[in-house]
Image (cartoon, helix red, strand yellow):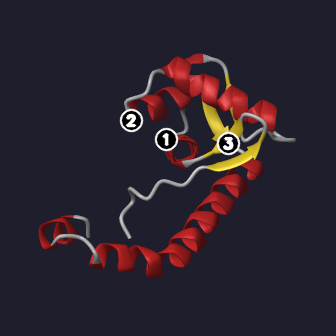
Amino acid sequence: MRENHLIRLHLQGDLSFGPGKAELLETVRDLGSLQDAANAMGMSYSKAWKLVRDMNQGFREPVLILHRGGKDKGGAELTKTGAAAVQLYRDAVAAAEKAALPALNKMRAMLASDQANSSV
């Protein structure tokens, strides 16, 4: 399936977890820096910081730990809770896409031929 099947999990109140937050956490894990992750995603640092703050406040344990101190001593670290949240989100997306596939294929079969070919 294509990556454009967006699924957002509404966890509680205003707290949700979707593709943007999952990508942000994965990018921080890979780059070791919230600033670098935000830049790589074309997101402002303040937006990335607010997303992390909201997630850290919403989960029992932080999903990301920010280390102050500039480029040499600073950085960001994905926690076990953050890694688990990302994996659970990816598992939920895979299960939802698998469950939706039969209906999606039937709907695609109903499309005009030029539309059916462009959506695959």
- x and y, in percent, of residue 44 in the image: 45, 21
- Of the residues tagged 2 and 1, which is closer to the observer? 2
Q: Mark 3 to mark 1: distance in Å?
A: 24 Å
* Few, some or many residues within 10 Å of mark 3 (<14, 14–19, 20+): some
- x and y, in percent, of residue 4 in the image: 38, 56
Q: Which amino acid does label 3 sit on?
A: Ser
- Of label 2 and label 3, which has the lower sequence position? 3
- The mark found on residue 40 in the picture is 2
From the viewer's perspective, tell me whether residue 110 is left or right of residue 97.
Answer: left
Identify the residue position indicated by label 1 in the image.
31
Q: Mark 2 to mark 3: distance in Å?
A: 22 Å
Which quadrant is the C terminus positioned in?
bottom left
Q: State if disc 1 and disc 2 touch (CB < 8 Å).
A: yes
Nearest the viewer among 30 and 47 is: 47
Q: Quadrant of residue 106?
A: bottom left
Q: Residue at x 62, y 68 (%)?
A: 91
- Of the residues tagged 3 and 1, which is closer to the observer? 3
Q: Is residue 71 shown above or below 60? A: above
